Amino acid sequence: MTARPSSPRRRAVVIGASVAGLLCAAAVSRHFDEVHVVDRDRRPRGLSARGGVPHARHSHILLHPGCVAVEALLPGAMAGLQAAGAAYGPASSRLVIHLGGGPIDLRTTDLAVLALGREALEGELRRQTQTLPGITFHWRTSVLDVRLDGGRRVVGVRATSLDDGQIADLEADLVVDASGRTSHIVDTLAGYGIPAPPVDRVRVDGWYVTRRFTLSPGRARPEALGELATIIQTTPGVLRRTAVLCRVDSRTWSVSMAGYGGERAPAELPGFRDFAQELSGPIVPVLADLVPDGDPVVFRLPNLVRRRFDRLDDPPAGLVVVGDAVCTVDAAGGIGMSLAAVQALALREALEAVPLRKVPREAYRRSAGTLDLAWRGALSRHVPATGDGVVIDRHVRQVLAAAEHDPVLGLAFSRVAHLQAEPHTLLAPPLAQRALAAAPSA
Ligand SMILES: Cc1cc2nc3c(=O)[nH]c(=O)nc-3n(C[C@H](O)[C@H](O)[C@H](O)COP(=O)(O)OP(=O)(O)OC[C@H]3O[C@@H](n4cnc5c(N)ncnc54)[C@H](O)[C@@H]3O)c2cc1C
């Protein structure tokens, strides 16, 4: 347990009460007397999806780095999530992944996965965060601007009530921008003459359609469906179509079909089912076995975006940007919430390690490695390989094909997918030799 710092750290403001905002509120709570979490949405009732998080109705799982970071930020969180209906445990027996062929052999993969409907997951994180000392939520309150002083130090935010239009300044020593993909922080910084961070942007034209299904009355879960989730991709190269089937609760599954580069799954049921025909794995018979429940939801993701706040020469003191506002990757990696959790943990570690003015740079430094891995993984799914990359890509495909029958290769793949290892580790000589030995001779 770290002692409270002696320097005055009175008030923190967190913009956004979604996964990144809640976890950052938990991260900063023991360092500030007051933590104000501001969100423009209505106060959520029960576990229903919020309008401010339109992606929440789509399939979500929490991968290993997210499980570890969430538990570190909110001790007991995994038990609380399980009590709220989550299934949690090692990927080995609970996750099924097809990358253009049969399931990857995950028998020896002990990395953890958690599955629960995204609304319930966020609801439980909110419940746990609310119990921390000093935290106040301000719903229906939209942040208009982050305010800096002449020395480019954060002094607070300007916010408006969406109920009565009143505008008020909320002073703060630390502001965390967790307002997601639509964050205005770059424009705000420009208003103070602060250069925009370098931005990496890749057009993917992602289109997600999600429908919920229940198990047929009296029927058990189809055996081909993983206990927690099943992920199916057309090929390990440039992605065109994927499907993710995630457990929402003991009888409900959400099925998301994603198309990239102009591919679009129809929302109506027959077309939705047809879209699955091109995918490998058990999706067609599994869908035939499930009962549709409710209306489809659609989400569009035009670009992958990474804003390199870690490369700003002189980031404003007291301002930290996290979550999708920093890095938006495709849903095929299932990693956005994990990145938010890793960034929140990095923020807490930075607060423990350095004076407040150095916290932004330190927090960005501590999470940059994990963000690099996620970003490179996303690029490998969407940017065609060129030059030497073509050969490397072919070798990786060989390793992944062999991983369907080899738990050692399955574990190596899993470590990359959960951001525990660099993709090039798949080509280490012992693994490459195993893959070569397994390849059918030409
Ligand atoms: C289709 C799809 C599937 C996904 N699947 C997975 C998955 O399986 N696993 C995974 O880990 N991740 C997944 N993700 C990513 C994940 O949903 C996000 O990374 C995660 O929600 C973290 O986002 P965030 O908290 O940064 O922002 P958001 O969730 O977008 O939340 C931003 C919050 O800020 C509030 N806000 C915005 N502007 C203001 C303002 N001016 N003032 C006050 N409040 C404001 C909004 O109301 C909202 O509550 C998926 C994403 C999509 C689109």
Image (tube, helix red, strand yellow):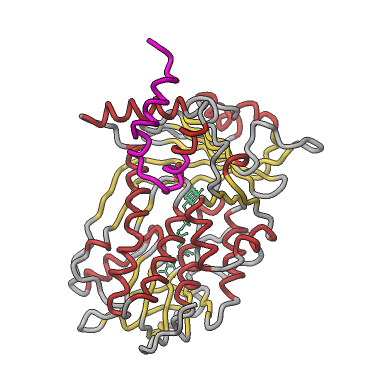
For the record, the magenta segment spans 413-442
Residue 405, horizontal then vertical, whole percent: 52, 26
Is 340 placed above or below 250 here? below
Q: Say which residue appears at 22% left-offset and 69% top-offset.
A: 190
Q: Which quadrant of the view contains residue 44?
A: bottom right
Residue 61, horizontal then vertical, whole percent: 55, 49
Which quadrant: the C terminus? top left
Query: In the image, 176: left or right of 210?
Result: left
> Is 205 in front, or is 408?
408
Query: In the image, 371: left or right of 153?
Result: right
Q: Say which residue appears at 25% left-offset and 54% top-offset.
A: 199
Q: Say which residue appears at 68% left-offset and 60% top-offset.
A: 84
> Is 58 in front, or is 73?
73
> Residue furthest toward the top?
442
Main SS class of the magenta portion in the image: helix
Residue 19, horizontal then vertical, whole percent: 50, 62
Residue 379, horizontal then vertical, whole percent: 32, 41
Per the image, is 416 magenta?
A: yes
Per the image, is 229 magenta?
A: no
Q: Say which residue appears at 54% left-offset and 25% top-offset.
A: 102
Is 118 placed above or below 411 here? below
Is 337 placed above or below 224 here? below
